[in-house]
Image (cartoon, rainbow, N blue to C red):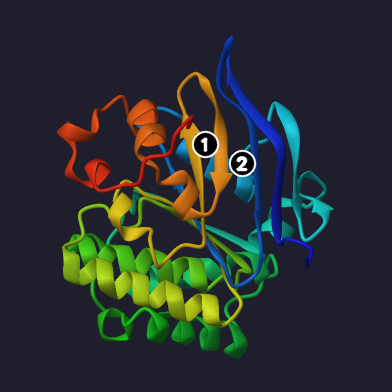
C-alpha cells in the first residue's frame, strides 16, 4: 500500500477539561475522498482545522506525506492544504476575482504582487469551478450556490494536494449538489485528495471511498461506506431511531454491531 497523503494517528482534541474526541485515525491517499460525518457539536470542524495545521491536537499525531504536519510552517502547509470553511466573511465589496486571488497569498513575496503564474492559477481555479463568468461580481451579492463555488475556487488557487471542505453541500439544491460532486470527482482524477464534512449522508455512496464517523462519548470509526453507513451505528451516533429517519431505515443491519 502506498504512503497516505494525510494520516491521523490516535488524534484527540480537548476543550478545557472536556475531550471533544479521542483516538481518531485516518489514512487518506491522493486521488481519494473521505466523508467526515457525525452529529452537531462532535468536532467535525475542529478535526478539519487540525488536518489543515491551523490547530494542534492535544493527543496523537498528524502526518502529511509521511512528514509531521506540525513541522511545517503555516506558509508551507498552506501551499499543500486548502481549508474551505462553512462560512467565509468578506467585510468589503471584493469582487470574485479579488477573493480568489487571496488563494495565492502563500506563494507571494512580502513586497511582490501577483505574477503571471499566479494569475494563471487564479484563472484555472475560476474555470474549474465554472465561476469565470462571475469574476467581476461582488462576492457578497452572490447566491449561496455561487458563493460555495467561489470558496472552492479560492481553495484551488492555493494549488493544494489536499482539499478540506466544511459542509460544502449546505444550502445547495440537488442540482448544485450534483455539480459539486462532479467537480470533486474531476479534482480527484487529477490526484487531489478530499476530506469533506457532510450532513447529507445520502451523497456518500458512490462519491466517497471512506467515512470517518465522529461519535459522542465513543471512539471515532473509520472505514469504507458499506461498513460505517450501518443502521445501528448511525442510530447510536445520531441518537435517532431508524423509523424516524427514512435514510437510516434503508441501511443494512449487522448482528453484533
Residue 196 visible? The answer is: no
| Crowd tier of the residue under label 1, counting other residues whose Cα lies within 10 Å: few below 14, some 14–19, many 20 or above | some
- State the image coordinates of residue 201 (x, y, percent, origin top left): 32, 50
Horizontally, is 41 left or right of 159 in the view?
left
* Above-or-below relation of 88 to 126: above
Residue at the (23%, 60%) spot, across then down: 140
User: Is 7 or 111 nearer to us in this picture?
Assistant: 7
Nearer the observer, 209 or 161? 209
| Residue 23, position as x, y percentages in the image | 66, 30
Q: Residue at x 46, y 81 (%)?
A: 186
Vertical position of residue 236 compared to residue 28: above or below: above
The residue labelled by disc 2 is: 50
Residue 193 seen anywhere in this rendered image of the structure? yes
What residue appears at the point 47 percent right and 72 percent down from the top-left corner?
101
Of residues 27 and 109, the one nearer the viewer is 27
Q: Secondary structure at mark 2?
A: helix
- Which residue is denoted by mark 1 in the rendering? 46
In the rendered image, the quadrant that contains the N terminus is: bottom right
Q: Quadrant of residue 47?
A: top right
Q: How many marks?
A: 2
Q: Nearer the viewer, residue 174 or 230?
A: 230
Above or below residue 173? Residue 256 is above
User: How many angstroms separate mark 2 from mark 1 (CA)?
Assistant: 6 Å
The residue at the point 31 percent across, 63 percent down is: 148
Do the CB atoms of the residues marked 2 and 1 lie less than 8 Å apart?
Answer: yes
- Residue 13 locus on image (x, y percent): 61, 27
Amino acid at each position: 500500500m502506498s504512503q497516505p497523503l494525510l494520516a491521523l494517528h490516535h488524534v484527540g482534541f480537548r476543550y478545557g477539561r472536556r475531550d471533544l474526541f479521542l483516538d481518531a485515525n485516518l489514512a487518506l491517499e491522493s486521488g481519494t475522498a473521505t466523508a467526515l460525518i457525525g452529529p452537531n457539536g462532535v468536532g467535525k470542524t475542529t478535526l478539519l482545522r487540525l488536518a489543515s495545521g491551523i490547530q494542534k491536537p492535544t493527543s496523537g499525531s498528524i502526518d502529511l506525506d509521511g512528514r509531521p504536519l506540525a513541522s511545517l510552517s503555516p506558509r508551507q502547509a498552506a501551499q499543500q492544504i486548502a481549508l474551505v470553511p462553512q462560512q467565509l466573511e468578506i467585510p468589503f465589496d471584493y469582487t470574485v476575482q479579488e477573493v480568489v486571488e487571496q488563494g495565492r497569498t502563500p506563494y507571494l513575496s512580502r513586497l511582490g504582487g501577483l505574477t503571471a503564474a499566479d494569475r494563471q492559477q487564479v484563472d484555472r481555479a475560476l474555470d474549474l469551478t465554472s465561476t469565470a463568468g462571475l469574476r467581476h461580481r461582488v462576492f457578497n451579492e452572490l447566491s449561496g450556490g455561487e458563493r460555495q463555488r467561489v470558496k472552492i475556487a479560492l481553495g484551488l488557487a492555493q494549488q493544494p494536494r489536499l482539499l478540506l471542505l466544511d459542509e460544502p453541500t449546505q444550502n445547495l439544491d440537488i442540482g448544485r449538489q450534483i455539480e459539486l460532486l462532479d467537480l470533486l470527482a474531476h479534482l480527484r482524477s487529477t490526484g487531489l485528495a478530499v476530506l469533506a464534512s457532510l450532513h447529507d449522508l445520502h451523497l456518500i455512496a458512490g462519491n466517497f471511498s471512506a467515512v470517518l464517523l465522529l461519535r459522542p462519548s465513543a471512539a471515532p470509526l473509520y472505514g469504507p461506506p458499506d461498513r460505517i453507513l450501518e443502521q445501528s451505528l448511525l442510530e447510536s451516533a445520531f441518537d435517532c431511531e431508524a423509523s424516524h429517519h427514512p435514510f437510516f431505515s434503508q441501511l443494512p443491519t449487522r448482528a453484533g454491531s
